[in-house]
Amino acid sequence: MTVANILPEVLAECGVDLTSPSIADNNFQMRQILSLMNTAGKDINRRAEWTKAAASFTVANASSQTLPADFQEMSDAGAVIWGLSGHVPVRPCLSPELWQLFEKFPPTQPYYMLRDGKIYFTETIGSEGAEVRYVSTNWIPGKAAITTDTDQPIFPDSLLARATIWRWKRQKGLAYDDILAEFEADLEAAVKADRGVA
């Protein structure tokens, strides 16, 4: 569903009465709802590795590459595969001290490290290339925030509605425990369904 379909539920639960609401409205209440929706969407996207947030890029003939603008985090497993035909996994290095050691004494097993908006490899990747899989910040197709009524989140719209509502209630000093509990239960079920585990 689009934001235009989600808005009436959010506004009704929040007790905000607006005629023909639009995310583009410049009144204070709508600006507040939009801000809460974008905060909620960003948080939901960070809480799981959604199938539709999966992205990748290829590195070839390089020992480092700048990460894409929509980079959020590396995929959970097998994030880097060296040699697109040979499928050699590349392990992550999380320790700067270990990486310094690797720079002096290159390991036989390839490693990568993220630093300063780039991905670095323990040795130059040749023309065979490597695929780097990551999670995108874009939880609306092509962007990381709601800007129009026709925007549609990549995860179930009920999650965005409930996450917005409990945030609004918390901000107003109202009880929000029930709606937060419903959101958390829905989130867990949605993540399982997205992974085909449900």
Image (tube, rainbow, N blue to C red):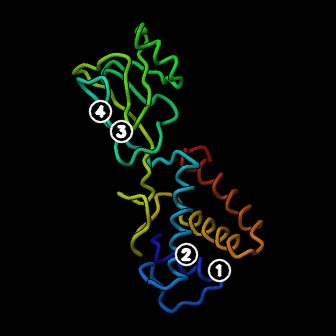
Query: Height in image: 156 above or below 2?
Result: above
Q: Amino acid at mark 4?
A: Thr
- Tell me which label, 2 or 1, sits earlier in the chain: 1
Q: Which mark, by number, is residue 33?
A: 2
Dot 3: within a 10 Å radius of its alpha carbon, few (fewer than 14), some, or many (20 or more) residues?
A: some
Which residue is denoted by mark 4 in the rendering? 58
- Tell me which label, 3 or 4, sits earlier in the chain: 4
Quick check: marks 2 and 1 in contact, CB under 8 Å?
A: yes
- Taking depth in this image into account, of 17 and 184 the one nearest to the observer is 17
Q: Is residue 146 left or right of residue 176?
A: left
- Taking depth in this image into account, of 114 and 185 the one nearest to the observer is 114
- Tell me which label, 3 or 1, sits earlier in the chain: 1
Report helix, strand or loop for mark 4.
strand
At x 55%, y 76%, the residue is 32
Q: Which mark, by number, is residue 67?
A: 3
Q: How much space separates mark 4 and mark 2, taking CA atoms?
A: 38 Å
Quick check: marks 3 and 1 in contact, CB under 8 Å?
A: no
Query: Height in image: 139 above or below 197?
Result: below
- Tell me which label, 4 or 2, sits earlier in the chain: 2
Foreground label between 3 and 1: 3
Residue 108 visible here: no
> Percent from the top left, x then y, of residue 189?
64, 53
- Tell me which label, 2 or 3, sits earlier in the chain: 2
